[in-house]
């Protein structure tokens, strides 16, 4: 029994020495892991709550849009952009508000929404679409240089044809036939390369190129 007690005491002494050496680092690691887990759970809960809140506001925006209540659409979109900019609802609301405001004749507000989406939307495709729509508004206002600036950014492949086509429209209206032809040709080449492209789009681009004459 005495031998067993001695052996047990040696084990306890060894464990005590090991803990004195490694106890603090291990405790720090455990605490750090616990903080990470708690932080992640807290962030997940916070993100879910913000998404729910943003969804409710976006639903209000949809109702206001159906009623053509421009003021409530503007307010809801503003709240989403200011307080829930990290959600997809902010992206969607900016584009929808811009469309509604543009149709109502409030081009200035529409451009403000589209500029926000072009710069701050979370989804790159949303940014591409916002720049394209903004360029269309600027083209209508004959703000050609500003429109070209929006179209100078390389978009996702799914927007390449529309960007090149609109660049051609802007350049054509500026009287820059050589540059316009090059832009239309770029769009046409992309359409031809895409086996799923619309024949109507190909025909339209060919007509635009022919209309330029011998540029």
Image: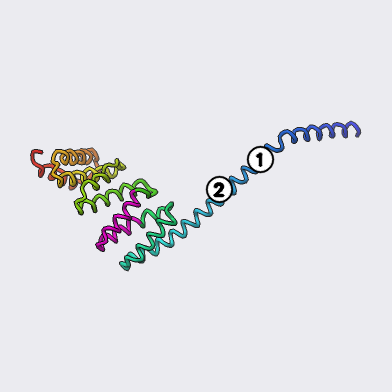
User: In front here: 196 or 33?
Assistant: 33
Residue at horizontal 24 percent and vertical 62 percent from the top: 105
> Which dot, 1 or 2, sits closer to the camera?
1
Query: Which residue sits at x=68%, y=40%?
Result: 27
**Secondary structure predominantly adopted by residues drawn in magenta:** helix
Q: Quadrant of residue 151?
A: top left
Q: Is residue 106 left or right of residue 17?
A: left
Q: With respect to residue 9, does 44 lie above or below? A: below
**Residue occupied by mark 2:** 40
Distance CA(mark 1)–CA(mark 2): 18 Å
The one of 95 and 207 positioned closer to us in this rendering: 95
Q: Residue at x 50, y 53 (%)?
A: 47
Spot occupied by residue 17 in the image (x, y as percentages of width and height): 77, 33
Give the camera-side residue of 180 and 147: 147
The outermost residue toward the right is 2
Residue 26, given in percent of the width and then of the height, sits at 68, 38
Residue 54 lies left or right of residue 25; in this view the side is left
Magenta-span inclusion, residue 111: yes
In magenta, the rendered stretch is: 94-118
Which residue in the protein does label 1 denote? 28
- Of residues 170 and 192, the one nearer the viewer is 170
């Amino acid at each position: 029994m005495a031998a067993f007690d001695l052996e047990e005491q040696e084990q306890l002494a060894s464990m005590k020495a090991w803990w004195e050496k490694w106890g603090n680092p291990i405790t720090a690691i455990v605490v750090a892991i616990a903080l990470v887990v708690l932080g992640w759970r807290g962030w997940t809960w916070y993100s879910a709550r913000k998404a729910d809140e943003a969804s409710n506001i976006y639903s209000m925006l949809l109702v206001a849009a159906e009623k053509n209540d421009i003021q409530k659409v503007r307010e809801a979109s503003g709240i989403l952009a200011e307080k829930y900019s990290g959600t997809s609802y902010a992206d969607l609301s900016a584009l929808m508000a811009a469309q509604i405001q543009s149709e109502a004749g409030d081009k200035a507000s529409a451009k403000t929404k589209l500029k926000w989406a072009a710069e701050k939307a979370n989804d790159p495709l949303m940014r591409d679409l916002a720049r394209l729509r903004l360029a269309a508004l600027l083209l209508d206002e004959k703000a050609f240089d500003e429109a070209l600036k929006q179209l100078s950014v390389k978009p996702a492949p799914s927007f390449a044809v529309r960007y090149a086509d609109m660049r051609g429209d802007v350049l054509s209206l500026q009287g820059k036939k050589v540059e316009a032809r090059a832009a239309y040709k770029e769009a046409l080449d992309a359409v031809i390369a895409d086996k799923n492209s619309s024949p109507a789009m190909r025909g339209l681009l060919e007509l635009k190129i022919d209309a330029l004459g011998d540029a």
